Image: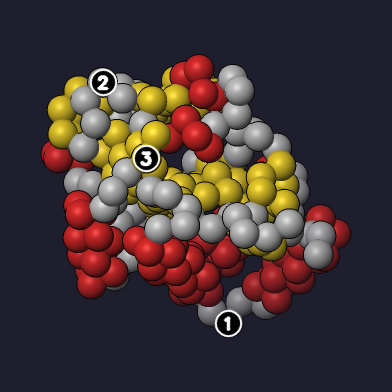
Amino acid sequence: MMIEIPNLLTPEELKLCRDRLAAAAWTDGRATAGTRGALVKRNLQLAEDSAEANELAQIVMRALQRNQLVVATAFPHSMTRPAFSRYEPGMTYGFHNDAAIMPMPRTPRTIRADVAGTLFLSEPDEYDGGELQIEDSVGSGGAKLPAGHLVLYPANTTHRVAPVTRGARHVSFFWIQSMVRNETHRRLLFDIDRSLAELNRAVPDHPALSRISSVYHNCLRLWGEL
């Protein structure tokens, strides 16, 4: 399930991120790729210990934590610190699969990568190509969203960043360990949650709402892990 979340960042946060990225120094993105990933990865990244990376990661993390749609979709237990990449003409990240276990920078901890996130920080008309293309059981889909918009998708999918042919593509990316490990269970919970929200607006006094809410929470109790 690929979920688009609009306007994760406020206009002020987005402007700050874009200003910092425009002036940042970049390093070879292959330094953080695994052996096979390095064969198909051609991009630039902010150094994890840079002042810009520290500042921007905090901004994105706060935005993720306050967004209710992120919570309803991913059920975050823990997540990696957001990182930042840049794609210039000729750069791409070929089809690959993310590692199942991701390190937590500056700590001995690791997380299980259940959900992957890409936060777009360049406007679509600022670059050509660069679509995030995701393959799943029902085919393939692509995303090239306005700056400040986020896409979440299962981390076990095969995906790529299409070659950029003009301009520069900036994104933030991260992984989430979900309290609900199974992707089908997360989808069912999300559908129930959205249906409850619609019914609460349409028929707020209907007695079935409490029963549906009970089903939601009992499913979360059954499937959730802490």
Between 44 and 132, which is closer to the camera in this rendering?
44
Verify CB contact (< 8 Å) between mark 2 and mark 3. Answer: no
Residue designated by label 1: 205
Going 60% across and 55% down the picture, which residue do you hit? 105
Residue designated by label 3: 27
- In percent of width and height, residue 90 lies at 26, 21
Residue designated by label 2: 90
Task: Specify whether residue 54 is in view.
Answer: yes
Dot placed on the residue nearer the N-terminal end, 3 or 1? 3
| Residue at disc 2, secondary structure | loop
Dot placed on the residue nearer the N-terminal end, 1 or 2? 2
Is the residue 56 above or below the residue 121 in the image? below
- In percent of width and height, residue 143 lies at 36, 36
Amino acid marked by disc 3: Thr
Res 56 quadrant in image:
bottom left
Amino acid marked by disc 1: Asp
- C-alpha distance separating marks 2 and 3: 16 Å
- In percent of width and height, residue 5 lies at 40, 55
Amino acid marked by disc 2: Gly
